[in-house]
Image: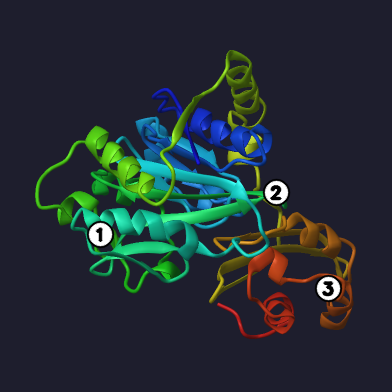
Amino acid sequence: MIFIDNEGHTNPKLNLALEEYALRHFDATTDYLLFYINEPAIIIGRNQNTLEEINYEYVDEKGIHVVRRISGGGAVYHDLGNLNFSFITNHDGKSISNFKKFTAPVIRVLNSMGVSAELKGRNDILVNDKKISGTAQFSTGKRMISHGTLLLDTDMSEVVKALQVKMNKIASKGHKSVRSRVANISEFLSSPITMSDFKKQLLHGLYEASEPFETYKLTEAEWQGVHQLKAEKYDLWDWNFGRSPKFNIQRNKRFSVGEIDLRIFVEKGHITEATIFGDFFGKKPVADIENLLIGVAYDKTEIDKKLKSLSLEDYFGKLTKSEFLDLIYGNDFE
Protein backbone atom coordinates (compact mmCIF):
# COMPACT_ATOMS: atom_id res chain seq x y z
CA MET A 1 0.00 0.00 0.00
CA ILE A 2 1.26 3.48 -0.89
CA PHE A 3 0.73 6.48 1.39
CA ILE A 4 -0.26 9.65 -0.50
CA ASP A 5 1.29 12.87 0.83
CA ASN A 6 -1.29 15.67 0.62
CA GLU A 7 1.46 18.16 1.55
CA GLY A 8 -0.43 19.58 4.49
CA HIS A 9 -3.35 21.07 2.58
CA THR A 10 -6.37 21.84 4.78
CA ASN A 11 -8.80 23.19 2.17
CA PRO A 12 -11.62 20.60 2.12
CA LYS A 13 -12.48 21.21 -1.52
CA LEU A 14 -8.89 20.54 -2.52
CA ASN A 15 -8.61 17.45 -0.31
CA LEU A 16 -11.83 15.92 -1.67
CA ALA A 17 -10.66 16.69 -5.20
CA LEU A 18 -7.32 14.98 -4.42
CA GLU A 19 -9.14 11.92 -3.09
CA GLU A 20 -11.33 11.62 -6.19
CA TYR A 21 -8.43 12.32 -8.55
CA ALA A 22 -6.40 9.53 -6.94
CA LEU A 23 -9.37 7.18 -7.22
CA ARG A 24 -9.85 7.83 -10.93
CA HIS A 25 -6.29 8.40 -12.17
CA PHE A 26 -3.72 6.65 -9.98
CA ASP A 27 -2.34 3.18 -10.75
CA ALA A 28 -5.30 0.77 -10.70
CA THR A 29 -3.09 -2.14 -9.62
CA THR A 30 -2.05 -0.44 -6.38
CA ASP A 31 -3.75 0.24 -3.03
CA TYR A 32 -3.38 3.71 -1.54
CA LEU A 33 -3.88 5.36 1.84
CA LEU A 34 -4.55 9.07 2.18
CA PHE A 35 -4.72 11.19 5.34
CA TYR A 36 -6.05 14.74 5.33
CA ILE A 37 -7.17 17.34 7.85
CA ASN A 38 -9.69 20.02 6.91
CA GLU A 39 -10.23 23.49 8.25
CA PRO A 40 -13.82 23.96 9.57
CA ALA A 41 -16.24 22.42 7.06
CA ILE A 42 -19.46 20.50 6.74
CA ILE A 43 -19.06 17.58 4.37
CA ILE A 44 -22.40 16.58 2.84
CA GLY A 45 -23.26 13.05 1.69
CA ARG A 46 -23.75 12.52 -2.03
CA ASN A 47 -27.53 12.05 -1.81
CA GLN A 48 -28.37 14.73 0.75
CA ASN A 49 -30.27 18.00 0.48
CA THR A 50 -27.61 20.42 1.70
CA LEU A 51 -29.87 23.22 2.91
CA GLU A 52 -31.81 20.80 5.11
CA GLU A 53 -28.65 19.44 6.77
CA ILE A 54 -26.92 22.66 7.85
CA ASN A 55 -27.58 25.72 9.97
CA TYR A 56 -27.04 27.98 6.97
CA GLU A 57 -27.04 31.32 8.82
CA TYR A 58 -24.42 30.12 11.29
CA VAL A 59 -22.29 28.46 8.61
CA ASP A 60 -22.39 31.59 6.44
CA GLU A 61 -21.57 33.89 9.37
CA LYS A 62 -18.57 31.79 10.45
CA GLY A 63 -17.26 31.15 6.93
CA ILE A 64 -17.47 27.38 7.35
CA HIS A 65 -16.91 25.47 4.12
CA VAL A 66 -19.80 23.37 2.81
CA VAL A 67 -18.71 20.64 0.40
CA ARG A 68 -20.49 17.62 -1.05
CA ARG A 69 -18.49 14.37 -1.23
CA ILE A 70 -18.96 11.59 -3.77
CA SER A 71 -19.84 8.92 -1.17
CA GLY A 72 -23.21 8.37 0.50
CA GLY A 73 -24.05 8.64 4.19
CA GLY A 74 -24.78 11.65 6.34
CA ALA A 75 -23.37 15.12 6.88
CA VAL A 76 -20.30 15.42 9.12
CA TYR A 77 -18.39 18.32 10.63
CA HIS A 78 -14.62 18.58 10.05
CA ASP A 79 -12.10 20.83 11.73
CA LEU A 80 -8.39 20.80 12.53
CA GLY A 81 -9.04 18.36 15.39
CA ASN A 82 -10.39 15.68 13.04
CA LEU A 83 -8.21 13.30 11.01
CA ASN A 84 -9.68 11.85 7.82
CA PHE A 85 -8.44 8.56 6.41
CA SER A 86 -9.14 7.13 2.97
CA PHE A 87 -8.32 3.67 1.60
CA ILE A 88 -8.34 3.59 -2.22
CA THR A 89 -8.44 0.02 -3.51
CA ASN A 90 -9.82 -2.25 -6.21
CA HIS A 91 -13.52 -3.06 -6.00
CA ASP A 92 -13.61 -6.85 -5.78
CA GLY A 93 -17.42 -7.12 -5.70
CA LYS A 94 -17.42 -8.01 -1.99
CA SER A 95 -15.88 -4.96 -0.33
CA ILE A 96 -18.60 -2.41 -0.98
CA SER A 97 -20.72 -2.04 2.17
CA ASN A 98 -18.13 -4.16 4.01
CA PHE A 99 -17.19 -1.46 6.49
CA LYS A 100 -15.65 -3.99 8.85
CA LYS A 101 -12.88 -4.81 6.37
CA PHE A 102 -11.62 -1.23 6.21
CA THR A 103 -12.30 -0.13 9.79
CA ALA A 104 -10.69 -3.22 11.37
CA PRO A 105 -7.06 -2.03 10.97
CA VAL A 106 -7.96 1.44 12.31
CA ILE A 107 -9.79 -0.10 15.27
CA ARG A 108 -6.83 -2.37 15.95
CA VAL A 109 -4.49 0.64 16.18
CA LEU A 110 -6.91 2.54 18.42
CA ASN A 111 -7.15 -0.50 20.69
CA SER A 112 -3.35 -0.61 20.90
CA MET A 113 -3.46 3.02 22.11
CA GLY A 114 -5.82 2.03 24.91
CA VAL A 115 -9.00 3.18 23.18
CA SER A 116 -11.69 0.46 23.35
CA ALA A 117 -13.11 1.15 19.89
CA GLU A 118 -15.49 -1.14 18.01
CA LEU A 119 -17.60 -1.03 14.86
CA LYS A 120 -21.32 -0.70 15.56
CA GLY A 121 -24.39 -0.10 13.46
CA ARG A 122 -23.92 0.35 9.73
CA ASN A 123 -20.70 2.28 9.62
CA ASP A 124 -19.73 3.94 12.92
CA ILE A 125 -16.77 3.38 15.24
CA LEU A 126 -17.84 3.76 18.87
CA VAL A 127 -16.20 3.86 22.28
CA ASN A 128 -18.54 3.26 25.23
CA ASP A 129 -21.46 3.78 22.85
CA LYS A 130 -20.16 7.19 21.82
CA LYS A 131 -19.30 7.80 18.16
CA ILE A 132 -15.69 8.75 17.45
CA SER A 133 -15.73 7.96 13.72
CA GLY A 134 -18.14 7.68 10.81
CA THR A 135 -17.24 5.96 7.56
CA ALA A 136 -18.55 5.92 3.99
CA GLN A 137 -17.77 4.30 0.64
CA PHE A 138 -17.92 5.02 -3.07
CA SER A 139 -17.22 2.78 -6.05
CA THR A 140 -16.54 3.52 -9.71
CA GLY A 141 -17.22 -0.14 -10.49
CA LYS A 142 -13.53 -1.04 -10.73
CA ARG A 143 -12.05 1.07 -7.94
CA MET A 144 -13.43 2.19 -4.60
CA ILE A 145 -12.90 4.57 -1.70
CA SER A 146 -13.50 3.64 1.94
CA HIS A 147 -13.02 6.76 4.00
CA GLY A 148 -13.81 7.99 7.48
CA THR A 149 -13.32 10.54 10.21
CA LEU A 150 -11.38 10.21 13.43
CA LEU A 151 -12.48 12.77 16.00
CA LEU A 152 -9.32 13.37 17.98
CA ASP A 153 -10.05 16.80 19.44
CA THR A 154 -12.92 18.36 17.47
CA ASP A 155 -14.81 21.36 18.84
CA MET A 156 -18.09 19.64 19.73
CA SER A 157 -19.91 22.92 20.32
CA GLU A 158 -19.35 23.76 16.66
CA VAL A 159 -20.73 20.38 15.56
CA VAL A 160 -24.01 21.23 17.28
CA LYS A 161 -24.18 24.79 15.98
CA ALA A 162 -23.24 24.05 12.37
CA LEU A 163 -25.31 20.95 11.72
CA GLN A 164 -29.08 21.18 11.54
CA VAL A 165 -29.84 17.74 12.98
CA LYS A 166 -33.13 16.18 11.93
CA MET A 167 -35.31 15.15 14.85
CA ASN A 168 -35.99 11.68 13.43
CA LYS A 169 -32.27 10.88 13.67
CA ILE A 170 -31.96 11.31 17.42
CA ALA A 171 -33.72 9.73 20.36
CA SER A 172 -34.88 12.96 21.98
CA LYS A 173 -35.08 16.58 20.90
CA GLY A 174 -32.44 19.17 21.62
CA HIS A 175 -28.71 19.68 21.35
CA LYS A 176 -27.94 17.63 24.45
CA SER A 177 -28.85 14.36 22.75
CA VAL A 178 -26.49 15.12 19.86
CA ARG A 179 -23.63 15.81 22.27
CA SER A 180 -24.28 12.54 24.08
CA ARG A 181 -23.80 10.49 20.92
CA VAL A 182 -20.43 11.91 19.79
CA ALA A 183 -17.08 12.02 21.58
CA ASN A 184 -13.43 12.83 20.96
CA ILE A 185 -10.78 10.11 21.01
CA SER A 186 -8.75 12.35 23.34
CA GLU A 187 -11.33 11.70 26.07
CA PHE A 188 -10.31 8.02 26.12
CA LEU A 189 -6.52 8.42 26.01
CA SER A 190 -4.47 8.12 29.21
CA SER A 191 -2.38 11.16 28.24
CA PRO A 192 -2.76 14.05 25.76
CA ILE A 193 -1.50 13.65 22.21
CA THR A 194 -0.95 16.13 19.38
CA MET A 195 -2.53 15.63 15.98
CA SER A 196 0.94 15.19 14.48
CA ASP A 197 1.79 12.38 16.91
CA PHE A 198 -1.64 10.81 16.46
CA LYS A 199 -1.09 10.65 12.69
CA LYS A 200 2.35 9.10 13.19
CA GLN A 201 1.03 6.46 15.60
CA LEU A 202 -1.87 5.59 13.32
CA LEU A 203 0.36 5.29 10.27
CA HIS A 204 2.95 3.25 12.19
CA GLY A 205 0.21 0.96 13.49
CA LEU A 206 -1.18 0.42 10.02
CA TYR A 207 2.32 -0.51 8.80
CA GLU A 208 2.27 -3.54 11.09
CA ALA A 209 -0.49 -5.19 9.05
CA SER A 210 1.43 -4.96 5.76
CA GLU A 211 4.72 -4.10 4.17
CA PRO A 212 6.07 -0.63 5.09
CA PHE A 213 4.26 2.09 3.18
CA GLU A 214 5.95 3.90 0.34
CA THR A 215 5.15 7.63 0.45
CA TYR A 216 4.06 9.15 -2.83
CA LYS A 217 4.28 12.85 -3.72
CA LEU A 218 2.14 14.08 -6.59
CA THR A 219 3.84 15.49 -9.66
CA GLU A 220 3.18 19.07 -10.75
CA ALA A 221 0.96 17.77 -13.56
CA GLU A 222 -1.07 15.68 -11.10
CA TRP A 223 -1.57 18.66 -8.79
CA GLN A 224 -2.76 20.62 -11.80
CA GLY A 225 -5.31 17.87 -12.44
CA VAL A 226 -6.46 18.02 -8.80
CA HIS A 227 -6.86 21.80 -8.95
CA GLN A 228 -8.78 21.49 -12.22
CA LEU A 229 -11.19 18.97 -10.66
CA LYS A 230 -11.63 21.28 -7.67
CA ALA A 231 -12.44 24.23 -9.96
CA GLU A 232 -14.80 22.26 -12.20
CA LYS A 233 -16.66 20.41 -9.42
CA TYR A 234 -15.94 21.05 -5.76
CA ASP A 235 -15.87 24.85 -6.05
CA LEU A 236 -19.30 24.95 -7.72
CA TRP A 237 -22.56 25.90 -6.01
CA ASP A 238 -24.37 23.45 -8.28
CA TRP A 239 -22.37 20.54 -6.86
CA ASN A 240 -22.45 21.58 -3.21
CA PHE A 241 -25.96 23.06 -2.95
CA GLY A 242 -27.72 22.51 -6.24
CA ARG A 243 -30.27 19.79 -5.51
CA SER A 244 -33.28 21.86 -4.44
CA PRO A 245 -36.23 20.36 -6.32
CA LYS A 246 -39.75 21.58 -6.92
CA PHE A 247 -42.14 19.08 -5.26
CA ASN A 248 -45.71 18.71 -4.11
CA ILE A 249 -45.36 15.27 -2.48
CA GLN A 250 -42.77 14.40 0.15
CA ARG A 251 -42.35 10.87 1.51
CA ASN A 252 -39.79 10.12 4.20
CA LYS A 253 -38.91 6.96 6.13
CA ARG A 254 -35.94 5.49 7.97
CA PHE A 255 -35.05 1.93 6.93
CA SER A 256 -32.25 -0.38 8.07
CA VAL A 257 -30.21 0.96 5.11
CA GLY A 258 -30.68 4.57 6.23
CA GLU A 259 -33.12 7.40 5.66
CA ILE A 260 -34.81 7.81 2.27
CA ASP A 261 -36.55 11.11 1.51
CA LEU A 262 -38.52 11.37 -1.76
CA ARG A 263 -39.58 14.67 -3.33
CA ILE A 264 -42.04 14.15 -6.18
CA PHE A 265 -43.80 16.71 -8.35
CA VAL A 266 -46.97 15.41 -9.98
CA GLU A 267 -48.87 17.27 -12.70
CA LYS A 268 -52.01 15.93 -14.37
CA GLY A 269 -51.48 12.59 -12.64
CA HIS A 270 -47.93 12.04 -13.94
CA ILE A 271 -44.55 12.45 -12.28
CA THR A 272 -42.70 15.42 -13.79
CA GLU A 273 -39.88 15.65 -11.23
CA ALA A 274 -38.45 13.12 -8.75
CA THR A 275 -35.55 13.62 -6.37
CA ILE A 276 -34.22 11.12 -3.85
CA PHE A 277 -32.32 12.26 -0.78
CA GLY A 278 -30.94 10.30 2.15
CA ASP A 279 -27.96 8.96 4.07
CA PHE A 280 -28.05 5.48 2.51
CA PHE A 281 -25.14 3.84 0.67
CA GLY A 282 -25.43 2.45 -2.83
CA LYS A 283 -23.23 1.38 -5.71
CA LYS A 284 -25.17 3.18 -8.45
CA PRO A 285 -26.44 6.78 -8.69
CA VAL A 286 -30.07 7.33 -7.66
CA ALA A 287 -30.37 9.62 -10.68
CA ASP A 288 -31.11 6.40 -12.62
CA ILE A 289 -34.31 5.92 -10.59
CA GLU A 290 -35.19 9.62 -10.66
CA ASN A 291 -34.98 9.67 -14.45
CA LEU A 292 -36.89 6.40 -14.78
CA LEU A 293 -39.86 7.82 -12.87
CA ILE A 294 -40.26 10.91 -15.05
CA GLY A 295 -43.45 10.69 -17.10
CA VAL A 296 -44.83 7.69 -15.19
CA ALA A 297 -48.40 7.88 -13.89
CA TYR A 298 -48.46 8.39 -10.12
CA ASP A 299 -50.00 4.96 -9.71
CA LYS A 300 -48.55 2.06 -7.73
CA THR A 301 -49.04 -0.50 -10.53
CA GLU A 302 -47.42 1.73 -13.16
CA ILE A 303 -44.50 2.58 -10.89
CA ASP A 304 -44.05 -1.13 -10.11
CA LYS A 305 -43.79 -1.90 -13.83
CA LYS A 306 -41.10 0.75 -14.27
CA LEU A 307 -39.03 -0.58 -11.40
CA LYS A 308 -38.97 -4.19 -12.65
CA SER A 309 -35.77 -3.64 -14.60
CA LEU A 310 -33.84 -2.36 -11.57
CA SER A 311 -32.09 -4.01 -8.65
CA LEU A 312 -32.84 -1.58 -5.84
CA GLU A 313 -30.04 -3.10 -3.76
CA ASP A 314 -27.57 -1.48 -6.19
CA TYR A 315 -28.92 1.94 -5.21
CA PHE A 316 -29.85 1.65 -1.54
CA GLY A 317 -28.42 -1.54 -0.07
CA LYS A 318 -30.78 -4.21 1.26
CA LEU A 319 -34.11 -2.55 0.49
CA THR A 320 -36.98 -4.55 -1.03
CA LYS A 321 -39.06 -3.32 -3.92
CA SER A 322 -42.22 -3.56 -1.83
CA GLU A 323 -40.64 -1.32 0.83
CA PHE A 324 -39.71 1.24 -1.80
CA LEU A 325 -43.14 1.09 -3.45
CA ASP A 326 -44.83 1.60 -0.10
CA LEU A 327 -42.65 4.63 0.46
CA ILE A 328 -43.58 6.11 -2.92
CA TYR A 329 -47.28 5.36 -2.80
CA GLY A 330 -48.31 3.45 0.31
CA ASN A 331 -49.50 4.49 3.74
CA ASP A 332 -46.50 3.33 5.77
CA PHE A 333 -44.35 6.42 5.93
CA GLU A 334 -43.24 9.15 8.33
Residues at marks 3 and 1, CA–CA distance in whole angstroms: 45 Å
Q: Farthest residue toward the front? A: 211
Which residue is the site of mark 3?
A: 307
Residue type, numbered disc 3 = Leu
Which residue is the site of mark 1?
A: 111
- Helix or strand or loop: what does disc 3 sit on? helix
- Helix or strand or loop: what does disc 1 sit on? helix
Q: Looking at the picture, how far across and down is residue 102, in whole percent? A: 47, 57
Residue type, numbered disc 1 = Asn
Callout 2 touching callout 1 (CB < 8 Å): no
Residues at marks 2 and 1, CA–CA distance in whole angstroms: 32 Å
Q: Looking at the picture, how far across and down is residue 328, in whole percent? A: 72, 75
Q: Farthest residue toward the left? A: 191
Q: Give the residue at x 48% y 38%.
A: 66
Q: Is 57 placed left or right of 90 in the picture?
A: left
Label at residue 140: 2
**Nearer-the-camera pick, 303 or 126:** 126
In terms of image quadrants, where is residue 235? top right
Q: Give the residue at x 33% y 38%.
A: 79
- Helix or strand or loop: what does disc 2 sit on? loop
